Amino acid sequence: MTFNSSNADKYWKEVDSEVRELSNSKIGIQKISLHSNESSTVYGLSIESVGGFNIFAYYSVPSGKGPFPAIFMTPSYQSVTGVPPLNRRKSHVVLAVCVRGQRLSDSKYKSNFPGLLTDNINNPMKYPFRGISADCLRAADALFSMNEVDTSNVGVAGIGELPLIVAALRPKFKVVMTETPFLFNEPFNRLNAKTDYPQEEYADLLREDPEALGSAQKTVALFSPQIHCKMISSITRFSCSNSEVEDAKALANLIKGESSIYTKSGKGFTDKSSGEDWLESKLKP
């Protein structure tokens, strides 16, 4: 479908404005002894976000003298965000946010899995990913405000579009690392017999209500990685399967800064290690 970029620009400026209005709000912090060890101390953060939501985040600080390079972890498409992994916590400040709808941040709204992807998709102002994106921006601002953080060496890492949205609207990030699957990359043009969840939720929507296509496409277009990649100047890495390389190349070509593509081997440990090595190498002072 054709896409009106001015609508997207207005939409994201409004989201950004709502987030920035909370820049002086107090952040609650409490040590979590259960997850702390000799190499890092883990805290729980309580962060006010837009729409009267209060979100939780894990915040880990390495032992020793800072400031430290930092990693902001955007959430995956699942109900729980876990404690940041030990390998990242040893040498980096790490913030892992639990966005609205996820456990520990679900007092006002509980996400359904499956179901989140198409919840209120006919109304872009009420679409959950608008608030989820705002939560990520709010948590990113909280991370940059921390005294332990070397703000010149901060990366954002995750799956799908959220790392790209954050980096597009917060150019202070030095590096971006994301991997497929993408949820909003023209998904209605890609539905077929082999489509997996969560993208299959779009097919479920159309089977239930074929007339929902037009409004759903308009909402999804606002979150398209194409519009956000054009705004990114950070060093960016895409990780994808062989079948997704051409799509990843198209997005990488939109990045203003340095970009690269890693093709997954299908070996989980190998692929994960490659990403962690890349991230660590790019965040060195």
Image (cartoon, rainbow, N blue to C red):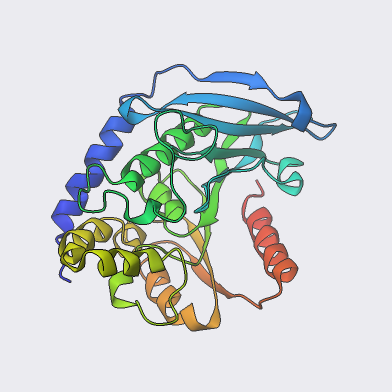
Please name whichever residue, 129 or 284, is drawn nearer the observer in this view of the structure: 129
Instruction: Please identify the quarter of the rendering in which residue 18 is found.
Output: top left
Is residue 185 among the parts visible in the rendering? no
Can the viewer see residue 244?
yes
Image coordinates of residue 255 in percent, x first then y, are 39, 64
Residue 12: image location, x then y, percent: 26, 45
- In this rendering, the answer to whether 96 lies above or below 187 is above
Residue nearest the viewer, comparing 86 with 104: 104
Total number of numbered labels? Answer: 0
**In this picture, is 33 found above or below 57?**
above
Residue at (62% x, 55% y) in the render: 282
In the rendered view of the protein, which quadrant contains the N terminus? bottom left
Taking the view exactly as shown, the residue that stands out farthest to the front is: 208
Q: Residue furthest right?
A: 38
What residue appears at the point 41 percent right and 37 percent down from the top-left corner?
Answer: 135
The percent position of residue 200, horizontal first and vertical second, equals 40, 68
Out of 249 and 259, give the one closest to the viewer.
Answer: 249
Image position of 229 with respect to 243: above or below: above
Residue 268 in the image: x percent, y percent?
Answer: 70, 69
* Residue 15, image quadrant: top left
In screen coordinates, is 219 left or right of 183?
left
Give the residue drawn at x 32%, y 55%: 118
